[in-house]
Each structure stands twice: as C-alpha cells, then as structure tokens.
Amino acid sequence: MRVARTPHQQRQGIFPMPVTGQLISGDNMDYIERDLEICALRTALDECRGGAARIVVIEGAAGCGKSELIDSLTEWADEGDLVLRAFGSPTERDLPLGLMQQLTGDAPAGAVPEVSVAPDGEPQVSAMREFQAALEGLSATRPVVISVDDVHHADSASLRYLLHIVRHSRSTRMLLVLTMPLHQDTQDASFGTELLRSRNVRRIRLRRLTPEGCRRIAHSAPGPTPREAVSGELHAISGGNPLLLRALLEEHRSAPATADGFRPEQGGLFGQAVLTCLRHSGPRMLDVAAALAVLGDAYTPERAGALLGVPAFNVAQSVASLSASGILTGHRFPHPHTQTAVLDQVPAKVLADLHLRTAELLHVEGESAISVAGHLLDAARLGGSLTVFPGTVDVLREASEDLLTQRDLVRATQALELAHKLSSDEQQRVDIKTRLAAVTWRVNPGQAEKHLSAPLAVLRAGRLAAERLAPLAGLLTCQGRVAEAGEVMSRILRETVASSTGGRDRTGFETRPDETTDAPGARAAHSRAPGGGSLDQEAGSSTETSAAERYLRTVVLTDDTLAPVMRALRSLTYFGHPDRAAACCRELIAEAERQRAPAWQALFSSALAAVLLRLSDLSAAEDYARRALGCLPEQSSSAFVGSPAATLIRALTLMGDHAAAARQLHQPVADTLFKSTHGLSYLRARGQYLMATHQLHAALGDFLEAGRLAGSWGLDRPAVLPWRTDAADVLFRLGETQRARTLVEQQFADPDARRPWVRGISLRLRAMTSDPRQRLTLLNQSADELGRSGDRVELARTLAELSRALRAVSEPARADAVIRKAWNLARECGAEALCEEFSPELGPEDRMLQRGAPEEFCSDLDTKLSDSERRVATLAASGYTNREISLKLHITVSTVEQHLTRVYRKLNITRRQDLPVDLHLAVSTAEAV
C-alpha cells in the first residue's frame, strides 16, 4: 500500500498531500491484510497470460488502497505485456473521450485507431468495433493489460467504449482492471448494471484495516515504534483507513513526545488526508460531514438533506460512503480528532449558519429546548449573525431552566445572556436580567450585582412594569442592597397600598413592615430577604424558631428558596438556637457543593462562620470565613465579600492576631460595600480591630457610621448589630461617660433588649456607670443572660468586669476565682487577646500555672479526683460559692464542703483560691474525650 502516485495523478490534484520525503512505506508493510486481494489480481493476470479474457473491478472506499493495488499491475507486468493506463479525474468528466485518449497514448504508434465521437457526442459503433478489433490484434501477439483508476470519473463516451470491451472481450488475452468506490455512480448508470450482468467480471473489495493490521503497520514503520496504547489510538482515529493511518504515523514520527498522548497537528498531514478522502468520496462531502458534525445525535437523512438542500437519499448514500472509508461510524465521527480535522476545513460563518438553521429545524420539529439552545449558543460562539426565528428567546429561557436542573450553570447562564442579547422587548429584557442575577449568584456574586443595573435604570425611568417589581426587590435585598431595594418596595407599597407585604410567607416567618419609621421600603424589603431575615419584634419566639428549623430541614435549595433559607438561618442564629443554625449551615454547604454552586457555598460558609463566632468558636469561625472567601472568584468585586471578611477580622482580632487582621483590612473592597448590609458587618469588625489596637476615635467613627446606615435603612436591630454598646465601650475608654450612658439606655429601650445576648451586653455596659453594690448585681445578671446566650467571649468579658467589681468591694478571694473563670473561658474560645488582657489580674500562683500543660493536669485529675469531686472543684474554681454549687448539683452544702476538703487534701492545697487556673479547662477536655 504505497502512497507515491504518477505524475499524471499529481497534475490532476488527485493526491494533494506533499510527497517530499516519501510518506511512510516499506516492503514489509506494503500489503498488510491484502493477501487475498493481491492473490486474486495476480491470478487474473496469470489467466490473461494463459489466453483468457478477464475483467476485475476493485472496489473500496476512499483511502483504502484501490489505486495502490491497481498500480501494482505495472510492477508485475513482464516485458512482453502491453500495459495501457488511464486515470479518471473530476476535471475531465465532461471531456469527450478524455480517458480513452489516455489509453491510446500508451499504445504503440499506429497500433490502435484514433477514438472519435459523432456530432451528437456519442461514439459511433463502427469506431468502437474498429478499436476492439485493434485490441484483439494486439492480444494475439502478447497479453494486453488495461488499467483504469477511478473509472467513476470517466466521461460518458469513454464509458461506452469500455462497455464495448466488456461485452466483446471473451476469448482474447486481455485483462481489464477498473477501480471504483462503493457508493458512487458513474455518469452512465448502465455501466454498473452491465458489469453486474457480465459473468466474466470478478470483484475485489478492499476493506479497512483491523486493529491488528494497524498495529502491524505501526510497528513496521520506520522511526520509533509507537506504544501499544498509541497504536490502538491510531486505529481509533483513522478508523482503519490506510491513508489516514499513514498520515497519522508520519505525524507521530515527527511529533515531540508528550505526556498528554498523541494529538494530530491542526492543518497537518492527517487533516489533509481527511480532506482528500472527503473529496474522493463524492460531491459535497465536506458539506455533508459538516452537517453531520453539527447535527450530532439529531441526525436523520431528512434533516441533513433539509440543511444541505439535497434529497435524503443522496445524504444517506454519502453517509454510507464516509462510513466505508472510516471517517464515520454510522453517522458519528469515530474520534474527536477526525471531527476536528473536518471542521477545520469549514469557515466559521458557514458553521454558524448550519447551527442556526439546525436550531430552527429542530424547534419546528418539536425537539427539546436544550437541543435547540445548544445550536443557538454554538452559532453565537462562532460569530454568526443570528437571525431570530419565532420563539428564539423563549426557547433560550426554557433551556436555561432545564440546564439548571442538570446543574449546568455555565450553559444556563450563556443561554440567558444570549436571550437578553436577542430580545428587543424592554420588559422581557428586565425579566432576563433579573433571572441572570439569580442564576449568576450561584457562581459569581459580583457579576450578579452588575446584572441588576439595567433593571434599576428602567425602574428609575418609570418604565418598569408592576409585576416585575417584587422579583427585583427580592434580589436586591439578597445582595444586601437594601437602599435600592427600598426604592423598589416603596414603589410596590404605593401601588398596592401596602397590602402585599402583610401576612406570612411560605416559610412561616413574619414579614410585617408595620414597625418601620423612617425607611419603610427598605425595612419591608429586608424583612423578606436572604441575609435580612424576619427582623420584626416577635421574631425569635419558640414557635417562629421551630418553624425556621422545620423549614431548613425540609426545604429544597433553589434560586427561589435561597431567600427564605437565609431568612430562616438568621432567625435561628440571632433569635433562637445558633447551635442548630450551625448544623443547618453544614447541611446547606454540602448541598451547595453537590449543586456545584461555589458562591452558595461561600454564602453558607459565611453564615456558619458568623454563627460560630456568636458561639465563641473563634478558630472554626476563622476557618469557615476563609473557606467562604476561597469559594469566590479572585478579585471579586462583590459587596458580599465584606461579610466573610468581617467575620474573619473579628475572629483574628479576638485571637490576638492583629497583624493578620490588618492584612485582611488592607484587602481592596467593592465600591458598593458601604451601600449594602455587608458594609454594616465590615464597619463593626473594623471598629473592633481599631479599638483593640487603641485607635479609639477611629473605632468610634466606624461604630457610629454603622448605626447611622442601619437607621437610615430601617435595620437598626441590636440583636444583629449592637452598635450602641460598641460605641459606648469606646466612649467609656475615652472618658465620655454621659454619652456612653445615653447610648446604653437607648439600647435598653429597644425591644431586642429582652433577648439574653443583647440584654447581657447592655447590662455590663450599664454596670460601668453604677455604684459598686448595684454594679455587682448588674454584672451577675449580665453573666446569667450571656450564659444563656451561649456567647462565651462576652461572658468572659462580663466575668472580668465582675472580678474587678468584687475587688473594688474588698472581696479578693471571689475576685480571684471569677477572673480565673474569665481567663479559662477566654482560653477555651481561643481569645488570646482577652487572655492577655486578663492575665495581669490573675494571682501569682495562677500566672505560674498558666504555663502548665492542661493535658498533664487532666491526667493527674483522673488519678486523684473522683467524678463528684471534679464537678465540685470545677464549679469552685469557676467562682461559685458553696451554696451556688449545692443548688447547681442538687446536693447539700455539707456535701460540697466535704468534697472540697478531700480535693484540697489530694491536691495539697489549703483554700479554694489555690485551685489551679487550668482546672476548668482540663476537666472540660477530659469530659469531651
């Protein structure tokens, strides 16, 4: 199976591939898997030499070696054989007797008469008889071998001459060998029929190579031997077509070795060989192959015919021809590289037009929206000029929803973006942009925020339809843009006389805006928003928080349920059970990961970080805040980044890592951060960092600005943002006691002051301006409230103040016990900043024991103290009196005293103040284990 061709063939452009530096060839690989075919052709030649007339038709697909096999006759011919050769060419199909003139040109001068046609273009019978007689005369003296390659390209007059030879050469020493493809007709349909009728015709069909044949050729080729895996891949790419295989081997021989496997070069020998096979397989084969690549599994002969404007029968015949050559398997390309080689030959605009017409065809035939949209997207990607057919935009929008159910966010977004581009209806474009904002929020919050700019512009121009207001308001609030959401809600309230905001939504949470004073639109919007939650005065009742938890346990996470999910989480976090909120957050993070929605993962990770911070698990809060930031695109321009960043800054500040907090604060933030609710959290976090680093005036400015923004948006809720006590704390340090007292009393006047967390913080700040005895009462109340809230960091702060108050009234023993408990709580939480603050107030023995190892002490306790003794000693070390211990453990005061006596003896101490500072931590660690 050699590739070298005659000069005539090269002139005709039959083999356009360069032959400089001969393509892979070798004596031991010329005829692999062609033994039977060669034997049949040699037998026919020998029988011709023996005096018999033989006719052989070599059939095969393009590239399978027909020309190589017929060329072998020239090599096999003896000096006594007369070989007449001709080659059919598409350029000579209309040249009368062009092929016969090639044959006569190889005959001895004067041995055969000139061939001719009548004025009507048909050859005369007498002329054909004369030519036949001349051939018989030649065959009387020596065998005559006539080879005609690609006879299907012969002109009709030459075919009539050849038919005459077929009919009348029965007893002459003449061998006629023709090559033709399997699925193409000649110009004269009777030619093929006559060949079928003749008993003297033998057919040799050349098939594609098997995988073993490909392997043998690959291993026989010069140069490095391909690995077994590569040999198999070469067969898969070539489909067993010898010409394609040789091109691949040539490219493989010269290609650099890579770990990614072999890939044909774009526009290289393989691509040229594919194009050659297409040209030799029939007319318009490149168009057919392109149509098949575009249609894919939607192919039918009728659809392809409609795209190409040809009958379905012709398409089916072309597909059969390409399948025979190995370029197709059925109607699909056997390997992506083969399809790529075909599409590389098709201009992008032609492909785009094919995709567009395929989309319209499939839409008319009722195919799925995803199938239709896929072709529209491909047409747009290729830069085609999209002509909108009826229903184009609707199909794209439907497809985007279907793609979302398949969790294909990228293509769903692309479908919506194309729908927006093609739509000319302003209200429809608003709908699409609003939906884009919701869908994009799954991946890129910054991009989602930008999508709402156009709907807002239409709103401000007064052209936004009433039915499109509510979705826009919900998404704006979802993004934390409550001021802009307030614009929309104010419009809704004006148009509906506030009737649409009353009652309960499907989550069962109150969404009443009736408590609003200065910003009704913003408050109403926020009450229905993710991240805003149900912030009315009844929120957080046991009924409401139970409803929130039930909702979170049963809801299916979608774009439509994202808002109520976040509202339910906030209800649990700030008004109910933060520990349960944490469990729900973890489940939602896992679900967002399953849905491949990284921004949702960031949203729920940020929510979990905030919950963990409220529960004083600083290390975990830091971890989840960083996870949230890591889920977002780099250099994100979203205001949402402010929320996890705020949690991270607060956690780092409490942990005493001021350098890391400062680095986070130096990260650029979105221009819109302080126009969103995320900016409120950020201002508070920055203020706490500034206060911790003694930049009190700057800290005060941030706390007051957070309060101003929250008030202007109708979101002034101490349960979420206790800016007044934050600012009061700074003012106390600055010596502005009266201003501080005013802010504290304002917070006490808020309904949220009934909640343990708010009340506990407020009581501590109120105690700072009270007389010593009343201060003790207020701080004890604060400790009880904060103990109920679960915020151990705030509890540690209150206990530290209580210790100072006890010391002020000359109760140093109790003061030591309480500050020890405060230090232990801070250490448990990882609040190193507080530990450092409290350390100077610890007694000398306690400061020495700070350097002890809790694990060693825990082991010592296990061997020395019973469970009952450990429980009593723990409470005593935490500052509880004997009576308080008896009430907590439901034992008598006498029993408490007995346990403590045994503890003192076992630990070799004489008083409760000597109980080690690590006792509480060690026991807690042991019990956890």
Image: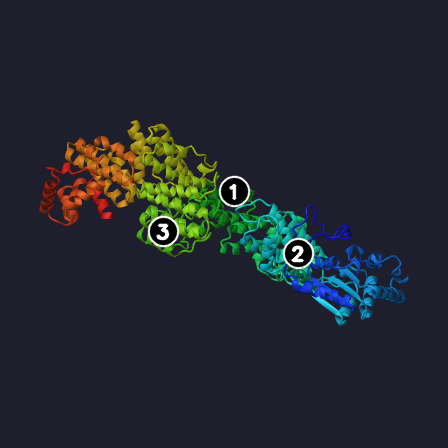
Residue 30, numbered label: 2
Residues packed near mark 2 inside 10 Å, few (<14), some (14 to 19) or many (20 plus): some
In the visual, does 549 lie left or right of 268?
Answer: left
Residue 574, numbered label: none
Residue for badge 3: 584
Q: CA distance from mark 2 to mark 1?
A: 65 Å
Residue for badge 1: 450
Q: CA distance from mark 3 to mark 1?
A: 30 Å
Q: CA distance from mark 2 to mark 3?
A: 71 Å
Q: Nearer the viewer, mark 2 or mark 3?
A: 2
Percent x, y for residue 908? 11, 38
Q: Specify the quadrant of the image occupied by residue 626.
A: top left
Residues packed near mark 3 inside 10 Å, few (<14), some (14 to 19) or many (20 plus): many
Percent x, y for residue 21? 68, 46
In the visual, does 693 lie left or right of 556?
Answer: left
Mark closer to the chain start, 2 or 1: 2
